[in-house]
Image (spheres, rainbow, N blue to C red):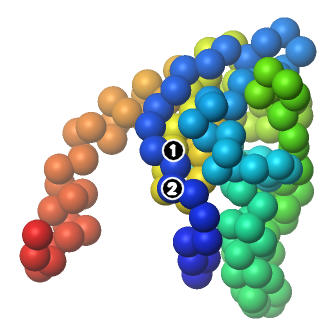
Amino acid sequence: MATRTGAVFLGEYEHALDDKGRLTVPSKFRAGLGEPFVVTRGLDGCLFAYPMDTWQSISSDLDALPFTSANARMFTRMIYSGAVEVTTDRQGRFLVPNNLRQHAALDKDTVLIGVSNRVEIWSRERWDVFCAQAEADYQASAEQLFQGKSD
């Protein structure tokens, strides 16, 4: 399993994808992501952005999966084939490749959220739907995940 090697990403930021497909990385995330960083297909219909050291750790974990497992082959193909190293311009923007824009249904309004060791990039619409669904299960999930652990 990947271990923490760098920044902790927190918060939620709204940004618009420009007409050329560029997205601004919030300044609070830029230093932690570094240059270059990796963007790839995420889970739940979003994109994942990783600092290079975290990506290398995840890559090592993926490389350790058995190639004889169909699930491992499928997952690593999807993660690696969607991965791209990106850098930001002077305004803190990077070009989101078309295949990744399609995967995450990114059109104009986006939300970038910090999730511990990664940044997730969501379409505003998908993020709103996810939050509405997750809100109903939030407390029950917490109780189940932390059952028996003391405060």
Question: As shown in the figure, which amino acid type bears the numbered disc 1?
Answer: Gly
- Disc 2 from disc 1: Cα separation: 8 Å
| Residue denoted by label 1 | 114
Residue beneath the point at 57% across and 77% down: 3
Identify which residue is drawn at 51% across, 56% down: 8
Vertical placement of 76 versus 41: above or below? Answer: below
**Which residue is label 2 attached to?**
8
Coordinates of residue 115 in the picture (x, y in percent)? 49, 50
Screen quadrant of the C terminus: bottom left
> Is disc 2 placed on a helix, strand or loop?
loop
Sooner in the amino-acid sequence: mark 2 or mark 1: 2
Q: In the rendered view, would you say 5 is above or below 32? A: below
User: Is residue 79 left or right of 45 when viewed as pictured?
Assistant: right
Percent position of residue 15, x then y: 62, 19
Residue sitting nearer the eye, 54 or 100: 54
Foreground residue, 49 or 131? 49
Q: Do the residues bearing badges 2 and 1 touch, measured as CB atoms within 8 Å? A: yes
Res. 122 visible in picture: no
Q: Residue 50 falls in which quadrant of the image?
A: bottom right
**In the image: residue 151, left or right of residue 69:** left
